[in-house]
Image (tube, helix red, strand yellow):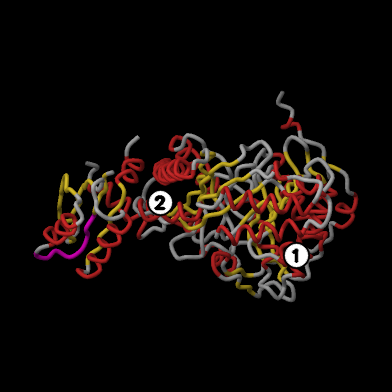
Amino acid sequence: MINTQDILETINMIREENLDIRTITMGISLLDCADSDIERACDRIYDKICRKAEKLVYTGEDIEKQYGIPIINKRISVTPIAMILAASGGDPVKYAKTLDRAAKQVGVNFLGGYSALVHKGFASGDEALINSIPEALSETERICSSVNIGSTKTGINMDAVRLMGKIVRQSAVLTKDKGLVGPSKLVVFCNAPEDNPFMAGAFHGAGEPDCVINVGVSGPGVVRAALSKIPEADITQVADTVKKTAFKITRVGQLVASVASERLGVPFGIVDLSLAPTPAVGDSVAHILEEMGLEQCGACGTTACLALLNDAVKKGGVMASSHVGGLSGAFIPVSEDAGMIDAARSGSLLIEKLEAMTAVCSVGLDMIAIPGDTPEEVIAGIIADEAAIGMVNSKTTAVRVIPAIGKKDGEEINFGGLFGVSPIMKVNTASPAKFISRGGRIPAPLQSLKN
Amino acid sequence: MRAIITVVGKDMVGILAKISTVCAQHNVNVIEVSQSILQDMFCMIMLVDVSKCDIEFTAFAEGCRKLGDELHLSVNAMHEDIFNSMHRI
């Protein structure tokens, strides 16, 4: 039998340190639902999602009880809807409403894939879909949207960057009386992964199989607790401890992924080994950085600590799973992380520092509230900066900022639930309008020429 | 299928008997038991075979948890594989 200490360690991780499976996400291809008639396409989409995901929630709950590990979310990602819209034309919001209905029917809390991939240019359907995002997000409950505007291989589509500055702002305006849910469910990517199980940026890429199970694990609390046991250790030992802990966390994800895939009769895709914080006490990435020896997140040294953490998480996780993918690393959303919220409130964490941190974390500027009067070209400028970091470093970066309509920096907004609370962060308002209005494409960097 | 039942809490008379009784009631065979005192806490770990259990494992696990609540102990019954996957390569 496994020794007592190991058994108690596992129980403690789950009961005290918030180890959980953050999401089982079923990726469903909708390519075979495309039709020149939008009504027929919607019917096919609804039927396919209900058929494939019929048992998803039930199976997730059953595994949760049997293995004693919380599985927080059961979700669905689908083929970027812009591809389906290309065949049918018509009002894209019809697709959003169909997806919302299907999500409710099968009982998942979010469905991602109201998306367009426009990193090199707009194809048929792309612009119409992007323009419909604010309305789609304000008129549905469970739909998440994402747009990929750049990649290392293609450069950055600056026309799309300009458009997304406007769309993010419009999404906020349209949902200002609904807790600003629009922009909190909209992600602008550079180098978007096609198999990411985490919302709001999940979609089912065109290279994916017909149906697949991807699992996202989490456990910032477990990593922090492990580090708190070695307060005097040098940094080599710190990295080693993170690595070993990430290995254990990911093994649980691999187990759940393989059991879920077997029971649902759907192939296993990847495990995404991300440290995804929640506003709950003891579930913070910022607190891990502080455990490493920073007075508060945002202090000088934060980027170095985060680089170490992100790298060690991947090294530990890679051996623990047969297929690692998605975003994999440490997330740094502001409103969803108790330590980040405190650091932003006290003025220790500024948006410029967060931008530097995104060069070494797994994603980007995430769940950051900005003043409501931030002009759309400034939002576009933020998107361009993030995309440039992703493009040059061959990594995924993303922007999910929330223009807090009617509020100024220094105030706070409460999103409720997992989205948390966010102090509104000050943004440099010197205008990038001329640069943004030029349009065109930033050429792919030398890093792309690997052939 | 095999499961691991862990019992952690303040030591008292009859813990082993009570947990074993629940196992016997549901035709769950106890394969191995180890118990120790860790930092003044009673800690018992049982490896059990639940393949002939007369109720769903999830209901059995829920029954164990409820018994724990009555006795002011933390009782968990979990599939063995979660421990195997985490601690064995």
Query: Residue at horizontal 81%, vertical 65%?
Result: A375
Q: Position of residue B77 (x, y in %)?
A: 28, 54
Query: Residue at horizontal 9%, vertical 65%?
Result: B13
The answer to which of A220 and B79 lies nearer the viewer is B79
At mark 1, the secondary structure is helix
Q: Position of residue A422 (x, y in %)?
A: 61, 68
Evaluate whether residue A149 shows in this view. Answer: no
Residue under label 2, please give it: A63
Which residues are drawn in magenta?
Answer: B6-13
Query: Residue at horizontal 79%, vertical 49%?
Result: A85
Q: Position of residue A105 (x, y in %)?
A: 59, 60
Q: Which numbered marker is on residue B13?
A: none
* Residue A165, image quadrant: bottom right
Q: Chain of mark 2?
A: A
| Of labels 1 and 2, the one closer to you | 2
* Residue A379, image quadrant: bottom right
